[in-house]
Amino acid sequence: MKDRARNLRRNQTDAEAKLWQSLRSRRFCHYKFRRQRIFGNYIVDFVCLKRRVIIELDGGQHLENQEYDNIRTQYLQSLASHHLLPQREKVNDRFFLFYR
């Protein structure tokens, strides 16, 4: 699983790269985000552990296996105070992260 997460970090999509530029090095509200982090049997795209925020970029793979994705989403929502699933196309245009 660690190798898979490492591979995902090295081969990120354009949308992931664009969002990562806004989140990395505490650029967003001085919160530390990590990318491709392992939680249980899943790897999340971005997470801020301190604020319990998980950001998953919702791409085409989420349409392929809806049942698996629903179980994954429920699990991640149980861990996070905020679980965001923006569509990749929206990140490429404009993406705003709201939090309380």
Image: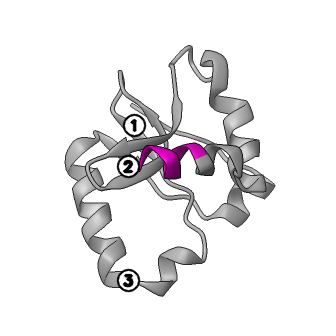
Where residue 93 sits: x, y (%)?
A: 80, 56
Residue 5 lies within the magenta run: yes
Tell which residue pokes out farthest to the top in this image.
30
User: Depth check: 61 or 26 in front?
Assistant: 61
Mark 3 belongs to which amino acid?
Gln
Label 3, residues with CA under 10 Å away: few <14, some 14-19, many ≥20? few
Q: Residue at 57% across / 43% down in the picture?
A: 6
Give the left or right position of residue 41, taking residue 33 as reference.
left
Residue 46: % across, % down: 51, 41
Q: Which mark is residue 66?
A: 3
Q: Could you tell me which residue is drawn at 51 percent across and 19 percent down? A: 31
Residue under numbered circle 2: 83
Q: Which residues are magenta?
A: 1-6
For the image shown, how many numbered marks are present on the structure? 3
Up the image or down, 88 lies above or below 44; here it is below
The reply to whether callout 1 and callout 2 are in contact (CB within 8 Å) is yes
Among numbered discs 1 and 2, the one appearing first in the sequence: 1
